[in-house]
Image (cartoon, grey):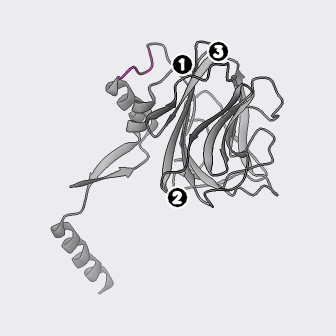
Amino acid sequence: MVFPVRTRIPLLAALVVALLLGLGAAPAGAALIAAWDFDDGTANDQSGNGFDLTAVGGGPTIAGGFARFTGNDASPSFLEDTGPGGMPEYTVSLWVRNQGATDQGSFQGIFSNNNASGAAFSWQVESFGGVFQWRTQAGTFAIGAPTGGVGAWDHIVVRKFGGNDGDIWFNGVQVVANLGANPGGLQMFRLGTNRNSNRLYEMDLDDVQVHDTLVDPTALFAAAVVTEPAPTLAMALCAGLLGVRRRS
């Protein structure tokens, strides 16, 4: 018997898996704009494009291969860098793990592309009343509620295509097929805050990726999910014996 375990695997390996899975994955010429896996204990861009994130208000705690944000609205602390700007297509993929109450209030920022809610084509991935949403100038679109409460990872993908439309995926499933309007661009990369920098979600973030074209969300989801065999009885007994020897 095997039990699914959500793990972080090296970025290159994840991309190789995505390509091998196919399923309408990114076409030839697709490029990874930015990636932050936090595995090296920093918020440096792993794509090699130099989008190293700057900590604002102290930033999150980065340890264990992920970034932990306090979500304290009274003392905003997040990460940001200037992005490439407007573009006709992109894919933003991130793993988020709730660390507080399911409902932490309104406009609790997870990822935003600007530092002003009134800016043209600005948008944010947020938690609002306990539900993940993609809020844009064109409207607000529900993504879904945290699936496992506190301590469970969820995968969110938002995509723009055709220059004026987009879709949303949650844990490998498409939840919005068409936005019906231009969602905006990549003016900034801001992790852990909303556009106004005053509402913050208490959470962990990991394996945040931004691509300059459409990447198959099911491949991105599958690339970070592996199955590991449950320990056999013999393995458990051996581990127990080793533990006894170490304590003796």
Image location of residue 112, percent across then percent down: 70, 36
Image location of residue 198, percent across then percent down: 81, 48
Is residue 24 on the magenta stretch?
A: yes
Q: Amino acid at mark 2?
A: Gly
Query: Could you tell me what secondary structure mostly forms the magenta stretch?
Result: loop
- 2 and 1 marks in contact (CB < 8 Å): no
Of circles 1 and 3, the one toward us is: 3
**Quadrant in the picture for residue 107:** top right
From the viewer's perspective, is residue 92 above or below residue 128? above
Q: CA distance from mark 3 to mark 2?
A: 34 Å
Residue at mark 1:
213
Q: Amino acid at mark 3?
A: Asn
Residue at mark 2:
149
Q: Residue furthest left?
A: 234
Q: Secondary structure at mark 1?
A: loop
Q: Give 211 or 151, whichever is nearer the viewer.
A: 151
Is residue 181 on the magenta stretch?
A: no
From the viewer's perspective, is residue 38 above or below residue 99? above
Label 3 neighbour load within 10 Å: few <14, some 14-19, many 20+: some
